[in-house]
Image (cartoon, rainbow, N blue to C red):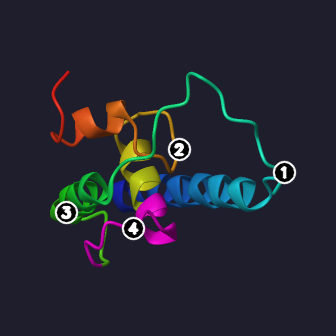
Amino acid sequence: MSELEISNMADISRFVLLIGVAVSLVACSDEQVPPSQSRIPPPSPAIIRKVQIALRNRGYYKGAANGFLGQDTGVSIQKFQLDHDQSVTPMVDNALLVSLGIRSH
C-alpha cells in the first residue's frame, strides 16, 4: 500500500467517525433535561468568536466569526478534537479552550 492510499484511508476513517457523531447528535431526543447544579454556563459569544478564530487560523473553520455556536462551528470543533486525540463533543469546554490557547490550565 502506498503512503497516499494509507493517508486516504485515514481521512476516510476520520470522515466516517465524524458522520457517526453527527448522526448520533441528530438522533438525540428533544426531551428536556432538568438543570443540574454542576452544569457549567454556556460560553459567551465573545468566547465562541475566539474559538471560531482559533479554529479558522488552524484550517478547521471556514465560516464567519459571529459568536454563534452553530452546526459549522460544532463540526469544526469535532474535527479539531478528533485530530488532537480529544474527547469528541461539539461543545466549548475548558479542555478545548486550553488546547486552542484561549485559556491557560
Mark 2 → mark 3, Cα distance in angstroms: 18 Å
- The reply to whether the C-beta atoms of the residues labelled 1 and 2 are less than 8 Å apart is no
- The reply to whether the C-beta atoms of the residues labelled 3 and 4 are less than 8 Å apart is no
The quarter in which the C terminus is drawn is top left
**Residue identifier under label 1:** 31
Q: For the residue labelled by badge 2, is the local secondary structure a helix, a strand or a loop?
A: loop
Q: Which mark is residue 68?
A: 4
For badge 2, the amino acid type reads: Thr
The crowding category of the residue bearing disc 2, from other C-alpha atoms within 10 Å (few below 14, some 14 to 19, many at least 20), is some
Q: For the residue labelled by badge 3, is the local secondary structure a helix, a strand or a loop?
A: helix
Q: In the image, residue 20 lies at what x, y percent?
A: 68, 55
Q: Which mark is residue 53?
A: 3
Q: Quadrant location of residue 16?
A: bottom right
Of callouts 1 and 4, which one flags the residue occurring earlier in the amino acid sequence? 1
Nearer the viewer's eye, disc 1 or disc 3?
A: 1
Q: In the image, residue 8 lies at what x, y percent?
A: 45, 62
Of callouts 2 and 3, which one flags the residue occurring earlier in the amino acid sequence? 3
**Residue identifier under label 2:** 89
For badge 4, the amino acid type reads: Phe
For badge 3, the amino acid type reads: Ile
Nearest the viewer among 81 and 64 is: 64
Nearer the viewer's eye, disc 2 or disc 4?
A: 4
Mark 1 → mark 3, Cα distance in angstroms: 32 Å
The crowding category of the residue bearing disc 4, from other C-alpha atoms within 10 Å (few below 14, some 14 to 19, many at least 20), is some
Mark 2 → mark 4, Cα distance in angstroms: 16 Å
Mark 3 → mark 4, Cα distance in angstroms: 12 Å
Q: In the image, residue 49 lies at what x, y percent?
A: 25, 62
Mark 1 → mark 4, Cα distance in angstroms: 23 Å
Q: Quadrant location of residue 81?
A: top left
Q: Is residue 69 rendered magenta in the image?
A: yes
Magenta residue span:
64-75
